């Protein structure tokens, strides 16, 4: 029988009976590895999307066919089972692979009839064979530049195999050590340490082995090597137990060799009844949660609001100062609602993350998607809503692999569809017999894009049974803040309410002292009230300090900062290192990022976290813990018990160590994030790299974060990211300035846009491009600078012979001539543009040309011709991903309809144009549309609605007029474009 051997541990190598097999492409090697390692069949569509994501479906399937043909020629039909729909390794294939053999050997360990922590002779032989197979990391040196999904799969397979190999080496070390076989144990320990030089327990194991083998000097050198690596990589000293072992070796007081009884013969395991274990006693310093006091009225209001919400949704805000207990009240209510059957989604906003578009919603929805029934809950939703939500959550494509692609971002109504898709997913994940709850904590730190989405959810409930609960700091949400306006609007519509928390009274504090079981000297509770002024967080913090003082000499510290410092002083060295790393990550942090950035092992990280939780410095995120039962691979998540505590730890960390930790956190985020989802964390990575002093890397990630925010209509965040990328010296300065100019034009910041475009033109490698000259002309036109606009259009025409581009420029020039009153020139330019557009077959140019021809016809009072051209322009715009052309055609067609006496149709067209303009964020044209709509509504006798639109028009146009630099009357006179 022909034997095929596949070696994937290390650089891939393929053999048949010892002879090398050469495959003609890297994709063929990747496909073979994927089929063998997964051990399952896969559809052709799935394989094509995995390996050729940049191609459309038909071309990707054609490439897959060619690759399968190459594999069939190399291996034969028996090895590959290929049908019209699926591909798999044949059931009788004579294929041996080192990866599958490696895992088979490790799995066989579990069949022996002895405890897992004991090793028999056969166990050691199995482990030895497995270690010999592991030549190097999985597919070392191999990758596909154009398939991020395959690279992601390869990365996670490699990480899993590395962990399995590390576990095997650890067992080999302990097994040989127990038998006094120190030389092979040392060899395996060195391989174990080479996998991760920061594993301090591996350094200790190797020190012990050298000492037991009589190599005292080697043991001491190993300690110095451990000190050097920890200082160079982490800037931290070894743990006390490592130093203690070093001192014992120095003094000759060697620790005894471990005694581990060996099991003589392996047997197949039989089912056994698990023996009960004695539960560990509770930590003596873990205080029980204190009850809510002084909150009976807010609690009753919350319950009434939840009952009132019903099937139509409801919005409730709990506000108050920092430390007042907003989050505690909300969490108690969530627990109460969950007990009654409610499903909840929790989103937290954090200080310093206001530039991360949709950050809290991404975090919350990812947690909800980790539940076991998430796919079942989402399956009834129409595919187009799921595709829209997948823009924000690429994981949906993995959870529901048959999703169709979403429409282009530039298509009409894209933002509204995107928001509705996210809303539909939220409701589906929360749906139950009682209304679901979306909790948004610390909403005052939310980014602008998240506030846009929240406004959509609140203002357009659409019969959604979703209760939205939010908290914010009163001092951070001033009277003119958009959140104030939102809650005022929902209160007026009786669709929401606001709950304001006040500080505790003296009796409430006394009640808390009594409940906590803390014995204080007489009148000390009154002194506690005066010291804390009834702020619940500080009261609880003081009581926790009192409960932890076993000497009974506890006294109230002079300030909260002193209190936090005193509590941190009790933390051991490992705990302090982890706290410093966590403080760099942020208020909330996950286990994997903390472990990787700190350089500590799993065991060290878990032990330190348990101690920090027991001391009340860190808390596990309860919502995430509930999900772990359904998604055991999901990383554990934690919070600092208060932001002031995190700030204290961060400020007490040296500047040099903070920079080091920021770099390691950035590396951890980059390593843990799949390539397709990098945009969503690019802002985080950039932030950490900047604070680490790595400005070049930070600039690149800020550029990625800006592109991602722009793709989600978060224009303000995108602009901020681009600004920062430039400030940090991004090399593509011209492109960044041009992108910033595009965003500034939409925001009506014309002075800034002009500077950005001019700077981009100055930085261009070959001078300003024709495209940039055209954009400058369009900008001058918006500001009413007709001569400058004409000059720029002429320059743009001289720089490009492409007929479609020239047609668009001539159309804009015609519009400028029309505004200058040069009717004959405007008509001639428009006809020239039409001829060029028809020659080029450019639909975008044709839509623009028919639009200006419609404008010109309406100015001549030739309304039938005007409507013909504008309807043609609208039809073309609707077939393209060009919302600008559609808005212009809708607006101008509405004006033509109004002139024809069809006011109601004109109003309907303008309302559609306004929705599109708001989605785009084009403020100047939003103002003009509000103004046009106000005129038509007034003519129709709808005076109240007309006045609302007029007020909005005045506010917007005033802002845009100021940003234009000097007084520009044309800003206010805009009606058609």
Image (spheres, rainbow, N blue to C red):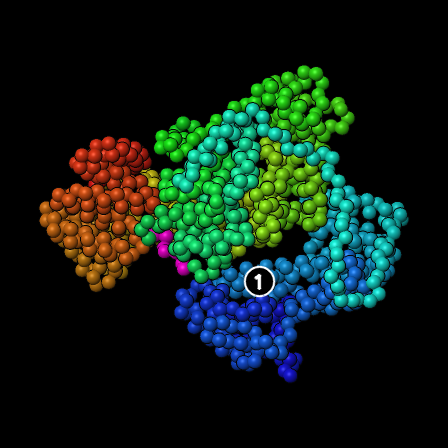
Q: Report the span colored magenta.
A: 404-410
Q: Residue 499 location in percent, x, y?
A: 47, 28
**Looking at the image, can residue 826 be seen?**
no
Tell me which residue sits at (86%, 50%) in the image. Answer: 255
Q: Which residue is mark 1?
A: 154
Q: Residue furthest right?
A: 252
Tell me which residue sits at (12%, 48%) in the image. Answer: 863
Mark 1, other Cα within 10 Å: few <14 / some 14–19 / many ≥20 = many
Query: Is residue 212 shown left or right of residue 575?
Result: right
**Looking at the image, can residue 927 be seen?**
yes
Q: Residue 158 location in percent, x, y?
A: 62, 61
Q: Residue 681 location in percent, x, y?
A: 51, 48
**184 or 282: nearer the viewer:** 282
Tell me which residue sits at (33%, 53%) in the image. Answer: 411
Mainly helix, strand or loop, the magenta region? Answer: loop
Q: Residue 558 location in percent, x, y?
A: 65, 21
Query: Is residue 856 shown left or right of residue 102?
Result: left
Tell me which residue sits at (48%, 46%) in the image. Answer: 432
Q: Residue furthest top?
A: 523
Q: Residue furthest bottom?
A: 1
**886 or 775: nearer the viewer:** 886
Query: Is residue 324 shown left or right of residue 935?
Result: right
**Residue at disc 1, secondary structure:** helix
**896 or 491: nearer the viewer:** 491
């Amino acid at each position: 029988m022909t034997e095929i051997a596949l070696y994937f541990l290390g650089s891939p190598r393929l053999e048949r009976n010892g002879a090398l097999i050469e495959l003609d492409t890297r994709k063929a090697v990747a496909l073979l590895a994927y089929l063998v390692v997964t051990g399952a069949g896969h559809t052709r569509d799935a394989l094509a999307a995995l390996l050729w994501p940049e191609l459309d479906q038909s071309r990707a399937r054609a490439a897959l066919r060619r690759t399968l043909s190459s594999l069939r020629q190399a291996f034969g039909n028996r090895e590959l089972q290929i049908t019209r729909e699926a591909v798999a390794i044949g059931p009788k294939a004579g294929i041996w692979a080192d990866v599958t053999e490696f895992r088979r050997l490790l799995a066989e360990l579990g069949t022996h009839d002895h405890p897992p922590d004991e090793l028999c002779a056969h166990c050691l032989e199995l482990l030895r064979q497995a270690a010999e197979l592991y030549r190097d990391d999985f597919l070392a040196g191999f990758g596909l530049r154009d398939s991020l999904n395959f690279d992601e799969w390869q990365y996670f397979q490699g990480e899993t195999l590395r962990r399995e190999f590390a576990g095997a080496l650890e067992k080999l070390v302990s097994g040989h050590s127990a038998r006094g076989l120190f030389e092979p144990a040392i060899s395996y320990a060195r391989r174990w340490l080479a996998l991760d030089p920061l594993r301090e327990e591996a350094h200790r194991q190797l020190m012990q082995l050298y000492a037991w083998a009589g190599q005292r000097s080697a043991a001491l050198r190993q300690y110095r090597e451990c000190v050097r690596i920890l200082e160079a990589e982490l800037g931290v000293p070894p743990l006390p137990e490592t130093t203690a072992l070093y001192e014992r070796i120095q003094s000759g007081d060697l620790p005894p060799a471990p005694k581990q009884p060996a099991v003589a013969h392996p047997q197949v395991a039989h089912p056994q009844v698990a023996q009960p274990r004695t539960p560990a006693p509770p930590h003596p310093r873990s205080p029980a949660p204190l009850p809510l006091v002084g909150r009976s009225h807010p609690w009753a209001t919350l319950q009434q609001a939840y009952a009132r919400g019903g099937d139509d949704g409801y919005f409730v805000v709990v506000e108050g100062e920092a430390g007042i207990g907003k989050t505690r009240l909300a969490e108690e209510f969530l627990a109460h609602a969950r007990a009654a059957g409610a499903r909840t989604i929790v989103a937290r906003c954090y200080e310093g993350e206001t530039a991360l578009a949709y950050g809290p919603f991404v975090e919350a929805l990812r947690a909800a998607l980790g539940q076991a029934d998430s796919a079942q809950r989402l399956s009834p939703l129409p595919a187009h809503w799921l595709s829209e939500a997948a823009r924000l959550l690429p994981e949906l494509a993995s959870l529901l692999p048959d999703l169709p692609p979403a429409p282009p971002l530039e298509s009409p109504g894209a933002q509204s569809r995107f928001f509705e898709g996210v809303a539909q997913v939220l409701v589906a994940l929360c749906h139950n017999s009682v209304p679901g709850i979306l909790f948004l904590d610390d909403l005052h730190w939310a980014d602008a894009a998240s506030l846009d989405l929240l406004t959509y959810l609140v203002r357009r409930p659409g019969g959604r049974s979703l209760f939205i609960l939010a908290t914010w700091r009163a001092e951070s949400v001033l009277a003119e803040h958009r959140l104030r306006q939102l809650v005022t609007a929902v209160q007026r519509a009786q669709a929401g309410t606001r709950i304001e928390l006040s500080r505790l009274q003296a009796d409430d504090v006394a009640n808390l002292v009594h409940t906590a079981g803390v014995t204080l000297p007489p009148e000390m509770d009154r002194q506690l009230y005066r010291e804390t002024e009834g702020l619940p967080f500080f009261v609880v913090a003081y009581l926790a300090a009192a409960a932890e003082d076993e000497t009974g000499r506890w006294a109230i510290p002079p300030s909260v900062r002193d209190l936090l410092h005193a509590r941190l002083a009790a933390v051991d060295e490992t705990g302090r290192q982890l706290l410093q790393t966590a403080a760099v990550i942020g208020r909330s942090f996950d286990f994997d990022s903390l472990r990787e950035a700190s350089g500590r092992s799993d065991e060290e990280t878990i032990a330190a976290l348990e101690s920090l939780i027991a001391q009340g410095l860190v808390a596990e995120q309860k919502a995430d813990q509930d999900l772990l039962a359904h998604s055991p691979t999901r990383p554990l998540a934690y919070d600092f018990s208060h932001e002031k505590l995190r700030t204290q730890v961060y400020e007490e960390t040296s500047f040099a160590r903070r920079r080091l930790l920021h770099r390691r956190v950035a590396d951890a985020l980059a390593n843990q994030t799949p390539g397709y989802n990098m945009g969503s964390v690019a802002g985080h990575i950039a932030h950490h790299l900047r604070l680490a002093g790595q400005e070049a890397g930070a600039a690149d990630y800020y550029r990625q974060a800006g592109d991602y925010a722009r793709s989600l209509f978060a224009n303000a965040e995108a602009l901020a990211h681009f600004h920062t990328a430039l400030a940090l010296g991004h090399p593509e300065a011209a492109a960044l300035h041009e992108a910033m100019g595009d965003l500034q034009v939409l925001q009506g910041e014309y002075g800034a846009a002009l500077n950005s475009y001019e700077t981009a033109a100055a930085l261009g490698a070959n001078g300003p491009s024709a495209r940039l000259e055209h954009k400058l002309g369009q900008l001058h036109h918006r500001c009413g600078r007709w001569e400058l606009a004409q000059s720029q259009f002429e320059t743009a025409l001289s720089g490009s012979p492409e007929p479609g581009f020239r047609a668009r420029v001539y159309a804009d020039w015609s519009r400028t001539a029309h505004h200058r009153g040069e009717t004959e020139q405007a008509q001639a330019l428009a006809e020239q543009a039409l001829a060029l557009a028809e020659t080029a077959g450019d639909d975008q140019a044709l839509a623009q040309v028919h639009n200006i021809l419609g404008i010109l016809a309406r100015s001549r009072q030739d309304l039938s011709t005007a409507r013909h051209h504008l309807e043609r322009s609208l039809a073309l715009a609707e077939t393209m991903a060009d919302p600008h052309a559609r808005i212009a055609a809708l607006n101008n067609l509405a004006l033509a309809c109004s002139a024809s006496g069809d006011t109601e149709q004109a109003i309907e067209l303008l309302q559609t144009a306004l929705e599109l303009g708001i989605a785009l964020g084009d403020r100047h044209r939003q103002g003009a549309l509000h103004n046009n709509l106000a005129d038509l509504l007034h003519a129709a006798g709808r005076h109240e609605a007309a006045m609302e639109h007029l007020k909005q028009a005045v506010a917007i146009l005033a802002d845009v007029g100021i940003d234009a630099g000097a007084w520009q009357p044309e800003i206010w006179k805009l009606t058609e474009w």
